[in-house]
Amino acid sequence: MVKVVVSGALGRMGTNIGRIVDEAPDMELVGGIDIREGTLFGTEVVPAGKIDAFLNEKKPDVLIDFTVAAAAVENIKAAARNDVALVVGTTGFSPEQRTTIASAVEGTVPAVISSNFSVGVNIFWKLVREAARELGDYDIEVTEAHHRYKKDAPSGTAKTILEILDQELGSREKVYGRVGEAERKGEIGVHVVRGGDIVGDHSVLFAGNFECIEVSHRAYDRAVFAQGAVRAARWVVGREPRIYSMQDVLGL
Ligand SMILES: NC(=O)c1ccc[n+]([C@@H]2O[C@H](COP(=O)([O-])OP(=O)(O)OC[C@H]3O[C@@H](n4cnc5c(N)ncnc54)[C@H](O)[C@@H]3O)[C@@H](O)[C@H]2O)c1
Ligand SMILES: O=C(O)C1=N[C@H](C(=O)O)CCC1
């Protein structure tokens, strides 16, 4: 049995993940962490200040974190201190926070960290890479849309798209929206939409003369992210202590 604690347990992703773990025959949900007390499918949810004592008491194999960037950094450090493997879906980390996470995890515990755990998005990233290799001279515009409650922008998935484009095309200027005189040059345009209950849409437009190619992904239910995170949790336990991607989990 893989023993799981969920941090961000009372949030949108935390509750989806809790349900899947609770129903999995090979997993045991042993509790949750959030900013306040509560319950997650009959297990105890404790405030973040008690994370060390809780991990020490429950001895989970893996902590799955979907919180906010500053909180995730602290939760990751706590998991590393308590020798608990990690799955991290939280987005919005600064470069400094990424460095802190790498030092906490590398050589200490295995961690799958991904801005998007859906299988479809991981394939979509591969398609974007392939298109960029062939269409580097086309104009490129990245657009993402999410629900009204999303805290970070652009999305972690969009930032990963920009990293892929930079890897394939070299670092290009990014222009975040346009207003006023905005003559197009060699930049990559980045556009963020927030509204309603949009689960998560991403598209990359490659526009040439007389033709356009648009590579896009649309999530209809958070279950796709939650299922991917739980798949990563099964995979990560017992691995060498370093950072892995969802592409590693999927063998892509
Ligand atoms: N990687 C992916 O596939 C993926 C998919 C969906 C969302 N996300 C990311 O996951 C994160 C959470 O998204 P959400 O929609 O569930 O948000 P949410 O606001 O619904 O849930 C976040 C939860 O974290 C809790 N929290 C805050 N500080 C905490 C702390 N110190 N310790 C424990 N819990 C704490 C909040 O109280 C809240 O319940 C965001 O960064 C989002 O971008 C990633
Ligand atoms: O709902 C969110 O928040 C999502 N966050 C991730 C991101 O920032 O890319 C993945 C999609 C949903």
Image (cartoon, rainbow, N blue to C red):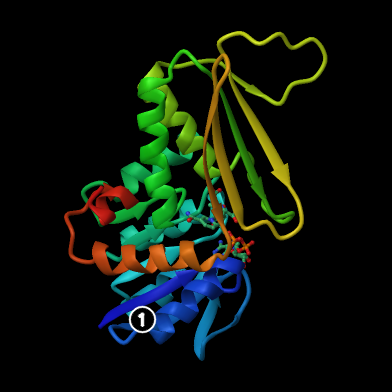
Q: Residue at x 41, y 74 (%)?
A: 5
Residue drawn at the location 32% of the way across and 42% of the way down: 103
Relative image position of residue 124 (x, y in whole percent): 42, 44
Please tell me which residue lies in front, 152 or 222: 222
Residue 212 placement, left or right of 149:
left
- Which residue is drawn at the image coordinates 61% and 8% (left, top)? 185
Residue occupied by mark 1:
57
Q: Quadrant of residue 188?
A: top right
Q: Amino acid at mark 1?
A: Glu
Instruction: Left or right? Give the position of 191 relative to 23.
Output: right
- Residue extending farthest to the front is 210
In the rendered view, tell whether residue 33 sits above or below residue 246: below
Where in the figure is residue 177, as x and y percent of width and height? 71, 26
Quadrant (top left/top right/bottom left/bottom right) for the N terminus? bottom left
Q: Is residue 142 above or below residue 23?
A: above
**Which secondary structure, mark 1?**
helix
